[in-house]
């Protein structure tokens, strides 16, 4: 009985680790923000010239 419970706990932990949601930077909103800040930092545009997402 203890072995079955231990296996069930391990299976739940593995499934929980694998079934996580997307990281923020891979979402649509995260990509927009990353592009905005990269343009300001590396594109030579000032924040007043950019349209904030």
Image: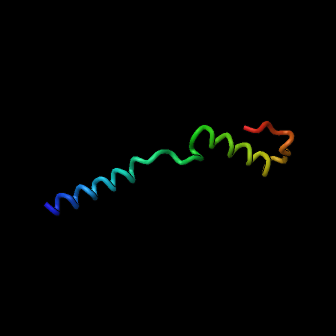
- The x, y position of residue 11, in whole percent, is 28, 54
- Residue 14 occupies quadrant: bottom left
35 sits to left or right of 15: right
Q: Nearer the viewer, residue 9 or 39?
A: 9
Image height check: is 30 above or below 1?
above
How many numbered marks are there?
A: 0
Image height check: is 4 above or below 33?
below
2 sits to left or right of 34: left
- Tell me the residue at 79%/47% (across/down): 40
14 sits to left or right of 4: right
- Tell me the residue at 78%/51% (across/down): 41
- Tell me the residue at 74%/48% (across/down): 38
Q: Quadrant of the C terminus?
A: top right
- The x, y position of residue 26, in whole percent, is 57, 44
Q: Quadrant of the N terminus?
A: bottom left
Q: Residue furthest left?
A: 1
- Residue 30 occupies quadrant: top right
Q: How is the image coloured?
A: rainbow
22 sits to left or right of 11: right
- Tell me the residue at 47%/45% (across/down): 21
- The x, y position of residue 46, in whole percent, is 86, 45
């Amino acid at each position: 009985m203890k072995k079955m419970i231990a296996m069930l706990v391990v299976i739940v932990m593995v499934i929980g680790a694998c079934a996580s949601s997307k990281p923020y930077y891979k979402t649509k909103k995260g990509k927009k923000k990353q592009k905005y800040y990269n343009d300001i930092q590396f594109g030579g545009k000032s924040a007043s010239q950019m349209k904030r997402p």
